[in-house]
Image (spheres, helix red, strand yellow):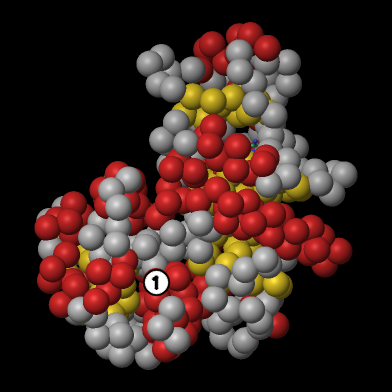
């Protein structure tokens, strides 16, 4: 990754007049709404007809738009954005549309630690990080011939579960695998899914304390995935598979959820361990992140993925969640991000939370 010098980037910034910007997709309504609540100006980067749609939501609409023909155009227009003292809030679609390589060198102050990219985008490194932190991940099956339990086959670089499939035997695997694509095979963990939304602040000590800074749990969701989550309306999965109908894992939405309270200490311990390990490996996962988990019948968490920035699963909670209400009323993740930037700007600590 090319070296980003955040100090240089911020030299000419008017820190009392910052603009929060993001790409108009994913969790942008929440990000703009949260920034607005904290008194920031907002800017939305959009392609095509998006602008019209935002008119329907005046409180989630950015104050101004930067229209582009292609998201890659952002790379050529950074000077224009710097003049507006823009701080970029990355979300999953932002990184995807720009491409991880280009995003990592984007010449704009960006919320969070961009060094996390190489640790989350490479499945091997992700495993080193999470297992190194003491978390349990689903077992990996290196050789498809060894499939002797239900497994999920994941294509690399697939987003939102597209193309993933379940196999119970080597034969089933062989029938469904697409040649020429790299993939990994994981034990299909039986249990219930919880997507846990954390916020780590390296500069605030007034939450669950860590060796540096503190951790909050802002909310949790369960993803709604088509067709797996409703396929049983048509018959059992086995019946359907016999007809050649295979369930898919494409995300279409998010459902609010809470976890039994006795599991909360484990939830915090996992978040703590992930952050502490990240501090050692690459300087820390800063701001929002999400652990994607399955809770088994033994009440053990298996973590199958980490998302290192705001996830769309926080969208049901624009006016607070059953957890964030215990921190501050009306606190969304988007608003929490804006608060962190506001606090850091006031205390001359922006370099601690931006890269
Ligand atoms: P994203 O990057 O959007 O998080 P992805 O393409 O990396 O998605 P995953 O999140 O790894 O995909 O998996 C997609 C879905 O597949 C999950 O939301 C979950 O429902 C299911 N899934 C993934 N891994 C497992 C597993 N080991 N056991 C059971 N279900 C799983």
Q: Nearer the viewer, residue 18 or 221?
A: 18
From the viewer's perspective, tell me whether residue 237 is left or right of residue 111. right
Query: How far across and down, in percent of the image, does residue 347 sit?
Result: 45, 86
Rendered view: 57 above or below 230 = below
Query: How far across and down, in percent of the image, does residue 86 sit?
Result: 26, 74
Query: How far across and down, in percent of the image, does residue 195 sit?
Result: 63, 55
Q: Quadrant of residue 71?
A: bottom left
From the viewer's perspective, tell me whether residue 110 is left or right of residue 344. left
Q: What residue sits 44% from the left and 31% below the top?
A: 156
Query: How far across and down, in percent of the image, does residue 39 sit?
Result: 37, 90
Q: Residues within 10 Å of mark 1 (few under 14, many from 20)?
A: some
Position of the C terminus by quadrant: bottom left
Q: What residue sits 66% from the left and 82% below the top?
A: 206
Rendered view: 261 above or below 193 = below
Q: Quadrant of residue 107?
A: bottom left
User: To which residue does mark 1 refer?
Assistant: 351
Mark 1 element type: helix
From the viewer's perspective, tell me whether residue 141 is left or right of residue 310. right
Asked whether mark 1 and ligand 1 are closer than 8 Å, the reply comes as no
Q: Nearer the viewer, residue 182 or 321?
A: 182
- Does residue 218 show up? no
Q: What residue sits 75% from the left and 59% below the top?
A: 269
From the viewer's perspective, tell me whether residue 181 is left or right of residue 128. left
- Does residue 328 show up? yes
Q: Nearer the viewer, residue 276 or 160?
A: 276
Q: What residue sits 40% from the left and 21% below the top?
A: 181
Rendered view: 277 above or below 261 = above
């Amino acid at each position: 990754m090319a070296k980003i010098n955040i100090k240089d980037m911020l030299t000419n910034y008017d820190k009392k007049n910052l603009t929060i910007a993001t790409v108009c997709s994913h969790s942008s309504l929440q990000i703009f709404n949260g920034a607005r609540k904290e008194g920031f100006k907002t800017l939305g980067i959009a392609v095509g007809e998006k602008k019209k749609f935002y008119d329907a939501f005046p409180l989630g609409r950015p104050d101004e738009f930067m229209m582009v023909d292609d998201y890659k155009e952002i790379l050529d227009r950074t000077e224009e954005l710097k003049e507006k003292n823009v701080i970029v809030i990355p979300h999953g679609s932002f990184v995807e549309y720009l491409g991880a390589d280009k995003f990592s060198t984007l010449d704009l102050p960006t919320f969070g630690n961009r060094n996390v990219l190489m640790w989350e985008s490479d499945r091997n490194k992700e495993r080193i990080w999470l297992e190194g932190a003491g978390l349990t991940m689903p077992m990996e099956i290196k050789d498809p011939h060894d499939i002797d339990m239900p497994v999920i086959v994941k294509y690399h670089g697939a987003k939102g579960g597209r193309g993933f499939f379940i196999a119970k035997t080597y034969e089933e695997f062989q029938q469904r695998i697409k040649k020429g694509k790299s993939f990994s095979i994981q034990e299909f963990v039986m249990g219930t899914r919880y997507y846990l939304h954390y916020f780590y602040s390296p500069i605030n000590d007034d939450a669950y304390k860590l060796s540096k800074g503190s951790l909050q749990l802002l909310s949790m969701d369960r993803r709604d995935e088509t067709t797996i989550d409703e396929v049983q309306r048509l018959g059992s999965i086995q019946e359907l598979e016999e007809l050649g109908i295979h369930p898919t894992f494409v995300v279409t939405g998010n459902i609010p959820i809470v976890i039994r309270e006795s599991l909360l200490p484990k939830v915090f311990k996992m978040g703590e361990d992930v952050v502490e390990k990240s501090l050692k490996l690459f300087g820390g996962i800063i701001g929002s992140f999400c652990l994607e988990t399955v809770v088994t019948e033994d009440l053990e968490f298996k973590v199958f993925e980490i998302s290192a920035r705001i996830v769309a699963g926080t969208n049901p909670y624009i006016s607070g969640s059953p957890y964030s209400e215990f921190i501050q009323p009306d606190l969304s993740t988007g608003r929490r991000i804006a608060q962190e930037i506001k606090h850091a700007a006031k205390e001359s600590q922006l370099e601690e939370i931006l890269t």
